[in-house]
Image (spheres, rainbow, N blue to C red):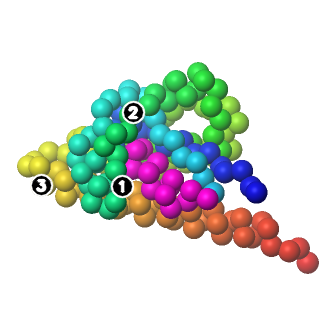
Amino acid sequence: MTLKKRVLFVCIHNSARSQMAEAFLNRLGGELFEAKSAGFEPGKMNPLVVEAMSETGYDLSANETNSVFEFFKEGKRFNYVITVCDEGAAQRCPIFPGVTHRIHWSFEDPSSFEGRHEEKLAKTRVVRDAIAAQVQEFLDGVKSKEILENAPKE
């Protein structure tokens, strides 16, 4: 039995992008990974994100937001820290002890979307689908790497 690799997804408020990435990775890659998410300034779950995710079978309605600094102070260890916010915010991410890989994926913030509810929801769906695709690409890459590393040596 192999230990699951621990992944932390980080964004500003932990109310949208990092929550979506955590949900996707836990469902799609749960045999290999344990994902958590946190924010620099934890807020409240974005209702547009809850609605968009429910359309694809994910219930985030009871999710709480977490502080990246609390995780850091608690000494939590992660194999991967993946920032899903803009470049400037990603620079504020603390260095976690024992982190093997630090990755940045840039996605628009659903809390910045303007317009009528339907317009904001449509933009949130685009972000949701982009995050799902990025998580799947990450999983495919990790699985390919593990296959190569575990291949018999000649």
Q: Which residue is mark 1?
A: 58
Q: Are marks 1 and 2 in contact (CB under 8 Å)?
A: no
Write down the residue under mark 2.
65
Quadrant into which the N terminus falls: bottom right
User: Within 10 Å of the Cα at label 2, are there few (<14), some (14-19), or many (20+) other Cα atoms?
Assistant: many
Mark pair 1, 3: CA separation: 19 Å
Q: Residue at x 80, y 73 (%)?
A: 151
Quadrant of residue 140 in the image? bottom right
Contact flag, marks 3 and 2 (Cβ < 8 Å)? no
- The kind of residue tagged 3 is Glu
Please indicate whether residue 86 sits to the left or right of residue 148 in the image. Answer: left
Secondary structure at numbered mark 2: loop
Mark toward the start of the polypeptide (1 vs 2): 1
Residue topped by disc 3: 118
Residue at left 55%, top 59%?
Answer: 29
Left or right, 8 with reference to 60: right
Residue 152 visible, this angle: yes
* Total count of labels: 3
Of badges 3 and 2, the one in the foreground is: 2
Residue extending farthest to the right is 154
Q: Earlier in the sequence, mark 1 or mark 3?
A: 1
**Considering the image in quadrants, where does the C terminus appear?**
bottom right
Q: Which residues are magenta?
A: 17-31
Q: Nearer the viewer, mark 1 or mark 2?
A: 1
In three-dimensional space, the C-alpha distance between marks 3 and 2, rounded to whole angstroms, equals 25 Å
